[in-house]
Image: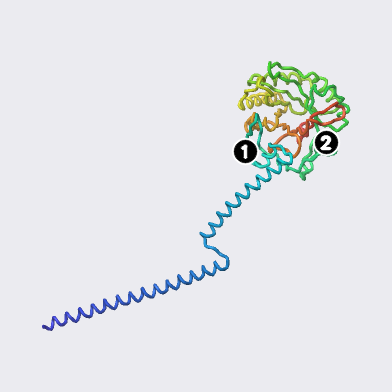
Amino acid sequence: MSRRVKTQNIISIIFLSLVALLALSFCIVLLLRNAALKKEEEAVQSELDALNEEGYYTTTETQVMIDAAKDEAQEAGKESVLDDMQTQLESGTSAISTIRSVFTDQLVVADSGRYFFFPITDEIEHHGFGTEDFTFNDDGFLEYTGEDSSVEILNGIDVSKFQGEIDWESVAASGIDFAIIRAGVRGSTEGKILEDDTFQYNIENAIANGIEVGVYFYSQAITDAEAEEEAQFVLDLIEPYEITYPVVIDIESADSSSARTYEQTQSQYTSGAKKFCELVEGAGYEAMIYGNVKSFTLLMDLTLLTDYDTWIAYYGTPLYYPYEFGIWQYSSSGSVDGIEGEVDLNIAIKNYAAD
């Protein structure tokens, strides 16, 4: 064998030896890394075992428990609501009041054997009074007992021919500040406009005894033109008198299927009320809309009437009506000196005579 071949063989052996050493080193590194990972894994597992022994849980285990707790809370909540409803009904609370106590973020209205739900909106200003802000005194009059020192209420009544001949001197002496007097009505079937039989007597004697006065008209208008006709009738009637409180359109639902407004739509009611108020304010008076919770939900879209004050009819406390109001008719069975029989009682939270 030549010297050259021997040299080549030696080089090959050395190269292969180096490759073998590198492979061995790599294997040793891998073994060491695996051993380190194994120790790391054992350490982590040991830590998890320790946490579990001390009452801690993994994220997955925690989420499972949260979901189970939610389901349990929902079931418990349902049972609690049902138990509360049952207790209320058994104690004599009406069905509508019971339902209202559950759906606190909505206005609930009962009509024709059905219940209607209206989400309470921030598109309309809220009055901000609390459930404990008004209480009845020993004489049956409503008083403000809240903490806002800027609130000053005025006592009022609303009257029509149904109160007969009123002794207005005695009414004034009893502490009544204002009276809303019925100017007239439109017949619910024939649609004829009539002046209230006692309008002239009531308004002249109320003013003569220092009582601030406003007027209202019971509307049965079925068109905008009829609503404007009603407003003009009232404006002509009150022209000789000093009217210091609002001129009001009274919007109430039809009592029977024979009423001309029986199939009146919300859009028609809303438009008619707006036309009445526009004409009244155009003549320089304060316009107002009277109604109950049903009037301001089912019958009218109040979001389209926010330019005008409302007179809410709701009997008893707390007031089941969240929106801003100027007058609250809180009783239909009040007693006031100078009036035989029952009369509607009101409070005004604005002094319209001073505006």
Where residue 115 appears, as percent x and y from the top left, is 64, 34
Pick whichever, 296 or 92, lies toward us: 92
Where disc 1 sits, the SS reads strand
Residue matched to label 1: 119
Residue 257, relative to residue 310: is it above or below? above
- Type of amino acid at the residue the image marks with label 2: Gly
Residue 147, relative to residue 140: is it above or below? below
**From this viewpoint, which residue is outermost toward the left?**
1
Where disc 2 sits, the SS reads loop
Pick whichever, 351 or 184, lies toward us: 184
Pick whichever, 204 or 49, lies toward us: 49
Which labelled disc corresponds to residue 140? 2
Going 73% across and 32% down the picture, which residue do you hit? Answer: 313
- Image-based side of 213 in relation to 56, left or right: right
**In the picture, residue 234 is in which quadrant?**
top right
Where residue 38 appears, as percent x and y from the top left, is 43, 72
